[in-house]
């Protein structure tokens, strides 16, 4: 059974925007099994170019994590016409909610990861670096509650550099008539306090160039942040799980690229 929490349920202090916002909970009940009360958790931010929240990168991914023993939460965050930093505040509130409700959901509060796809990857990477932003304080959220312990970035949008930018994506959430600030070009935001990060992408991606992942991996390396990077040669953008039961177009089924999830799970366990 899926529990769907409204903005008022998981983050009552958040500013109200025009987008439908919810946190969907995919969590096993505590029934006395070994590991109850100490499972890892992941908050999932689907992609959609800050124009929509892609369903194929939400529930199918959550169910796959849940089947692997990870309590999963899917965030439907604010998109156009809402503006930054509203989605950032929602992502931070979602992570803090899972941590505060760890006992109820059978979660280890020290193992709350964040997983983002495409524009959701931009949001996840932003929270990775801006978890101590003063904007969280008026919501009653502390940096320790907001900071994800691990981050998984799937073909993420990272940079606003003109030569690699994805036209329209960051402009939708910042303002189409205003230049995107360097702050949202996240390869410039990494510090040694950025959480350990797992990245994967396809070099054939024609929507978000693989340079986004490479730029971010380079920044992690320079900052001394533990990371793992997997690049697949073949595959389009927005593959999600890249499996037959999770995609909306046949050409998105890519068995080789689908190995990203077992690799990410192994990485989480190893961390």
Image (cartoon, grey):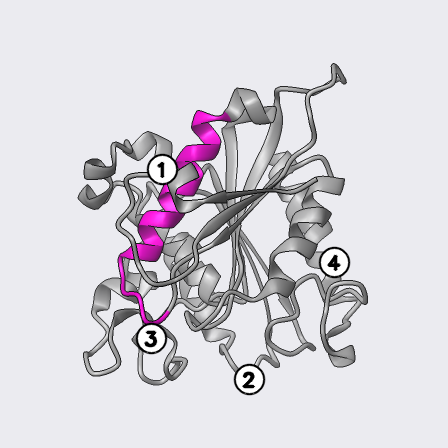
Q: Quadrant of residue 3?
A: top right
Q: Position of residue 214 (x, y in %)?
A: 47, 67
Q: Position of residue 234 (x, y in %)?
A: 69, 77
Q: Earlier in the sequence, mark 2 or mark 4?
A: 2
Q: Which element is circle 1 on?
A: helix
Magenta-colored span? 80-101
The answer to whether any part of residue 124 appears in the image is yes
Q: Position of residue 97 (x, y in %)?
A: 43, 34
176 over 9 or under it: above or below: below
Q: Which of 95/193 is in front?
A: 95
Q: Are marks 2 and 1 in contact (CB under 8 Å)?
A: no
At x 43%, y 58%, the residue is 20
Q: Earlier in the sequence, mark 3 or mark 1?
A: 1
Q: Earlier in the sequence, mark 4 or mark 3?
A: 3
The residue under label 2 is 206
The residue under label 3 is 172
């Amino acid at each position: 059974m899926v529990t769907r929490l409204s903005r008022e349920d998981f983050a009552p202090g958040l500013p109200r925007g025009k987008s439908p916002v919810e946190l969907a909970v995919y969590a096993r009940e505590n029934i006395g099994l070994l590991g109850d009360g100490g499972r890892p958790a992941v908050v999932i931010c689907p992609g959609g170019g800050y124009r929509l929240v892609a369903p194929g990168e939400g529930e199918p991914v959550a169910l796959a994590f849940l089947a692997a023993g990870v309590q999963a939460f899917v965030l439907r965050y604010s998109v156009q016409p809402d503006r930054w930093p509203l989605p950032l505040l929602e992502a931070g509130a979602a992570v803090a909610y899972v941590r505060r409700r760890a006992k109820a959901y059978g979660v280890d509060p020290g193992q709350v990861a964040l997983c983002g796809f495409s524009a959701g990857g931009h949001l996840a990477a932003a929270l990775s670096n801006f978890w101590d932003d003063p904007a969280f304080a008026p919501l009653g959220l502390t940096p320790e509650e907001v900071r994800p312990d691990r981050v998984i970035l799937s073909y993420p949008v990272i940079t606003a550099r003109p030569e690699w930018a994805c036209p329209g994506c960051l402009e939708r959430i910042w303002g189409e008539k205003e230049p995107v600030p360097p702050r949202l070009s996240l390869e410039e935001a990494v510090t040694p306090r950025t959480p350990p990060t797992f990245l994967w992408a396809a070099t054939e991606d024609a929507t978000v160039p693989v340079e986004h992942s490479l730029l971010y991996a380079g920044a992690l390396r320079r900052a001394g942040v533990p990371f793992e990077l997997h690049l697949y040669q073949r595959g389009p953008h927005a593959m999600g799980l890249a499996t037959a039961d999770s995609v909306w177009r046949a050409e998105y089924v890519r068995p080789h690229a689908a190995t990203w999830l077992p690799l990410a799970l192994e990485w989480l366990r190893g961390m």
